[in-house]
Amino acid sequence: MASFAVSGILAYNHTNQALDELWKSHFHAVARAATAKAEGEIRKIHQVIDGFSSLLAIKQLALSDLHQVSDHMLVQATKLDPGMSIGYGTTDGTGSLHVRHTMDGLVRIHRSGSTTERVYSKDLEFISETPLAADLQAAFNSSDYRQQPWFRHAQETDGIAWARPYRLLTGALGISASLQARQQSGTPPSGTFHVDLPVDELAVWLSQLMTGNTGRVFILDEDGAVVIEPAGPESEIQGIRTLLKSALSTESVRDKEIKPGTTQDASVDDGGSIYRIGYSPFQVSADERWAIAVIAPESDFLKLANSHLLIVLITATTAVLISIVIASVFARRVSRPLQEISEDLETIADLRISKRQSPDSFILEISNVGQAVDRMKAGLRSFERYVPAGVVRRLVASGKAAEFGADRRELSIFVSDIEGFTSIAETMEDDRLVDWLRVYLDHITGVVEDCSGTVDKFMGDGVLAFFNAPEAVPDHVARACRAALACQAMPRHSQPDAMPVPVTRIGLGLGHVLVGNMGSTTRFGYTVIGDMVNLTSRLEALNKVYGTRIMATAEFRDAAGPGLEWRTLDRVAVAGRRGGVTVCELLGETGGTDPDTMAARDRYETALTQYHAREFEPAAAAFSALAADRPSDIAATLMAERAGVLALDPPGEDWNRVYVFEHK
């Protein structure tokens, strides 16, 4: 009997310890995911506010000129996610501006006192001026914006002020970051900028990170007040909110010495029911930090151990030998599923999220824990869509925190856009447009990643990607070519019924650029900048001029190696860049390009050689003949016109064969 009791106690302690470790591993994984998600949203806000601060610092923004302010706000609005907005209000209450990046991808700006709003495309091309909806007219024009939380909170500090959840002017529940704007240091503020972030989507995402059976995840400020809470029934959330406030009322839990990224464990007694609480702070700005708080009933994790001991004690009176066997088998059946779940959580901590379902168990509590882990994994998969997975995994594997900095590396740059996207968007309903664009971007992203590329960012319908970072790719130029060709081959059946198949224009460039974590000191993202990025973007736009689909520099063509067919198009100088560059069109792979296209390529390049040799009349005749045979060859038509003009009015001896584009 004594040996059985000892076995029972050992089994109890083993299960209790395993479940306690399970809670800690579970909280660590949830806190990491929630922190990364929150920091990602806050980073976007800081980038916009830092942009305004920089303009004021270098005296490039006159706050007295609301037209100039509105122009800069339009540019900053394109950096926001759809649903977010920015605004500006003068200190004396004489005028305000409000710019929304709406879910249809358009940018809308309203000035106080007006009953209309101006609508722009994502490229900031003016579309129309439309009447403001009745509910928005009332919100924008009927009250003094200086009574809004974003304005009042900004008056209390010289830094960035955060307004806790309130109803935004659009009617959505959200938070705001605001900053007083001074024309120069030491002068009274002329006005206040603010950025609004609706929190509904983030609240739903937090609810998917449910811990245990009834646990929840909150985002708090440093005083323990709720900033963002998970979506759910108010009656349920209210009770958990009260418990959380009680637990965090002690200074030990919200200790200022707790470093961001670390965790603090606590518990609170609610009428005999013990709740476990995990608290992990993170920096919002230099002067303020928030925290991820995870709260769950201890019974969700530890009740099993008590039940196990009770079963052992009851069955001990029946038969010692049988009870020992039962206890041993039972302990294994309890610990094995927990061990599998714990191992799964360890891989989740490295952002290696398996598709394996948690093991089934005949014990309700273990089954509930497994189901909660599966729900959390689903939420983490959503998080991976916001950050390049390869970048995050490399950072996690290093065991170091993300640091600001970049290095110079030779990359292949890839820029794409949809031909005629603005016209297409105007003909579609919002839901259908979003679905259509999702399918298209899924295709582009899949092709780039299959070719070992990294998608930097989506710019509406546009995509910026690069090859050879963060991991080295020896044949990155050839891979970028294959990706560009595969993007052109989007199958018609991949689009929803009755949807147009998008035509993709792509620019390709090769050069040494800066790549790494860039942005502000506390908020940055893994991205790329450099002259070649700008040039590649210009090449993508030049496709429209020459009627081509894929355009690259001659240096890129030469580095791509054999197996590809190209056509030399022209020698150009793009807007904003000195010096000429030879541009080429990627036609296809060797052996896979039709003979007519190859013959037309040879005729075009022969005419181009005559053109560069100042033989303008023969060149014009050759280009014209090619254009007549192939009316769809816009480049041949364009060059025929240029050669004809130069034949009538030849250039001077200093002609360098470069055609200069004055506009982007």
Image: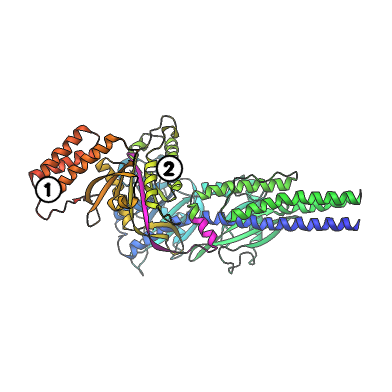
Q: Where is residue 238 shown, x and y percent of the image?
A: 63, 50
* Residue shown at the point (47%, 45%) measured from the top left: 171
**Between residues 423 and 267, which one lies in front from this camera angle?**
423
- Amino acid at pointer 2: Leu
According to the picture, the residue beneath numbered tag 1 turns out to be 614
Looking at the image, is mark 1 or mark 2 earlier in the sequence? Answer: 2
Q: Is residue 502 magenta?
A: no
In the rendered structure, the answer to whether residue 204 lies left or right of residue 71 reads right
- Mark 2, secondary structure of its residue: helix
Residue 488: name its quadrant: top left
- Looking at the rendered image, the quarter that the N terminus falls into is bottom right
- Cα distance between the residues tagged 1 and 2: 44 Å
According to the picture, the residue beneath numbered tag 2 turns out to be 441
**Between residues 104 and 229, which one lies in front from this camera angle?**
104
In the rendered structure, the answer to whether residue 412 lies left or right of residue 402 reads left
Q: Where is residue 93 shown, x and y percent of the image?
A: 37, 56
**Between residues 154 and 413, which one lies in front from this camera angle?**
413
Q: Which residues are magenta?
A: 391-420
Q: Residue furthest top?
A: 498
- Mark 1, secondary structure of its residue: loop
- Amino acid at pointer 1: Arg
Q: Where is residue 450 shown, x and y percent of the image?
A: 45, 46
> 10 Å neighbourhood of mark 1: few (<14), some, or many (≥20)?
some
Residue 191 in view: no
Query: Relative to 175, does residue 500 appear above or below in the rendering?
Result: above
Query: Relative to 45, does residue 104 appear above or below in the rendering?
Result: above
In the rendered structure, the answer to whether residue 618 lies left or right of residue 441 reads left
Q: Colour scheme used in the picture?
A: rainbow
